[in-house]
Image (cartoon, rainbow, N blue to C red):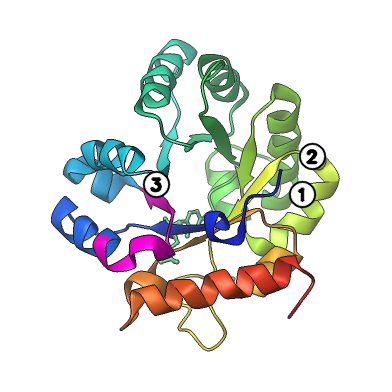
Amino acid sequence: MTPNPRERLIVALDVANVREADAMVERLGDAVSFYKIGYQLAFGGGLPLAEALVRAGKQVFLDMKLHDIGNSVAGGVASVARMGVTFLTVHAFPQTMKAAVEARAGSALKILAVTVLTSYDDIDLSESGYQMSVDDLVARRAQQASDIGVDGLVCSPEEASPLRLVVGPEMLFVTPGIRPAGAASGDQKRVATPSQAIAAGADYLVVGRPITGASDPKAMAEKIVAEISAASQGGP
Ligand code: C5P
């Protein structure tokens, strides 16, 4: 079932500490219902914050990109599932994905796979021992994720259409690299507007600095929700 437009916006809380995160959540208020917590905040007190957000009725995406032996992945995923969060990332290695999918069974937690980190190019892969292009490895890992029963993929908006042909309709696509028209792209190399990402088949949009760095974060979040809403009805 397609979530409502507001639930499709995930705000990346890439801030240094819980105090800053609390202030941003307070400012965003009802405009935002879904937050992403990554390494920086998680290791700065963000895990209790994740549980507090869940208690406050928000959804949480823990971007922990797990990868370890299956037994350790399973233990970590089971603990995350008990926190009540909605999404957790793992690296798209078959053993890791299988352990994560098994360990989240019976909970509301959904596992998202990261195929190949977007900072990697073909030379980085070659240096890591892979005789394969980034595009080929992304497609292979997406197929494996689908076969294993992973719930979704983190992908760029431009990867979404080609990957949909690989994985079928039920896999969720969660796309960072979103920039409202006219916003600075920062260190993101490939960006798309919210409308372009929705048109490309994204289910959820991850937006950080365009919202957290805006002079009026709440107004920017509302603007993006409106754009998601228009785009999902086939509008501009
Ligand atoms: O500030 P910005 O909108 O660029 O934030 C995007 C978020 O998505 C960050 O938390 C970043 O870590 C995450 N991300 C990304 N590119 C990926 C995977 C995750 O930008 N390929």
Dot 1: what SS? helix
Residue 31 x %, y %: 42, 65
> Exactly how many numbered labels are in the figure?
3
Find residue 163 and name its label: 1
Residue 182 x %, y %: 53, 89
Viewer-nearest of discs 2 and 3: 3
Dot 2: what SS? helix
- Residue 194: image quadrant is bottom right
> What whole-number distance in Å separates the C-alpha atoms at marks 1 and 2?
6 Å
Task: Determine contact: label 1, label 3, CB under 8 Å.
Answer: no
- Dividing the image into 4 quarters, which one contains the C terminus? bottom right
Find residue 108 and name its label: none
Label 2 neighbour load within 10 Å: few <14, some 14-19, many 20+: some
Find residue 58 and name its label: 3
From the image, tell me which residue sits under label 2: 167
Query: From the viewer's perspective, is 121 left or right of 16?
Result: right
Identify the amino acid type marked 1: Leu
Q: Nearer the viewer, residue 73 or 33?
A: 33
Identify the amino acid type marked 2: Val
Q: Residue furthest right?
A: 165
Residue 183 visible here: yes
Identify the amino acid type marked 3: Lys
Residue found 39% across the figure and 61% down from its top: 30
Residue 86 x %, y %: 48, 37
Task: Determine contact: label 1, label 2, CB under 8 Å.
Answer: yes
